[in-house]
Amino acid sequence: MDVTTDPFTSEEICEQATGNAGALSLVLLAYARERGESLPEVARFAGRIFAPGWDTERGKGARVAARWAALNAVSCGSTLQRLTGDSKRASTTVSGWPTDEDLAFVGLSRDEADALFEVFDPIATRLGLRYSWRRDGDAVEMTFEETDT
C-alpha cells in the first residue's frame, strides 16, 4: 500500500468514528455494570465531565442545547427524526441506536443502554435548563426547557 496518498475516504473515517463512539459509550456502561455501579450515575458522571465544554452555549436557549444533544446522539449512530422548539422549550427525537446487534455485542439490555441519555442532565443543569428524556419504541425524545428561576 502506498501511504503517501490517503488510503481512507472521509466517508470511511466518519463511519468508523461513529461506530467507535457508539461502541465506546456502550462499553463504558458494560464496564460499570460489571463493577456494580449505577449506570445512570455513570452517565451523569460523564455529563459532569463534559458539561464545561458546553459553556459557550450557555444563555443560547433550549433549541441550541437540543440541537447539540441531537448531534452528539447522531455522532454515536442515531438517526435524527425531529428537532423542534424555541429558546424556551425544545425537543429532539433520535432513533436507531443502539441496535440489537450493538446491545448483544456488549451484553447490555436496551434499558441498561438507555442510561446513556442521562449524560445530558448535568449539561442542561449547567446551562440553566431542565432536561428529560423518554423512549417510545425505537425512538428517544430529549427535551430541554428553561427553568422557572
Image (cartoon, rainbow, N blue to C red):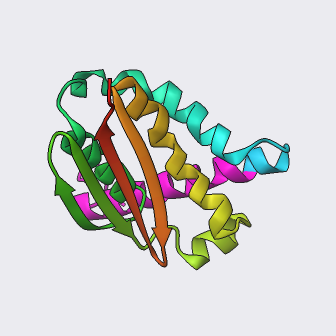
Q: Residue at (75%, 47%) from the top-left corner?
A: 31
Q: On screen, 106 above or below 35?
A: below
Name the residue nearer the viewer: 18 or 51.
51
Q: Is residue 11 magenta?
A: yes
Q: Residue at (36%, 63%) from the top-left corner?
A: 15
Residue 14 coordinates in the image, percent (x, y): 31, 57
Task: Work out which residue is located at the far front of the displayed protein and give it.
Answer: 148
Identify the image quadrant of residue 78: bottom left
Q: On screen, 140 above or below 124?
A: below
Residue interval drawn in magenta: 1-30
Name the residue nearer the viewer: 145 or 35.
145
The secondary structure making up most of the magenta span is: helix
Residue 81 coordinates in the image, percent (x, y): 27, 70
Q: Residue at (33%, 32%) from the top-left corner?
A: 147
Residue 93 makes an appearance in the image = yes
How many marks the image carries: the answer is 0
Q: Is residue 24 magenta?
A: yes
Residue 7 makes an appearance in the image = no
Residue 103 coordinates in the image, percent (x, y): 64, 70
Name the residue nearer the viewer: 118 or 26.
118
Asked if residue 79 lies left or right of residue 104, the reply is left
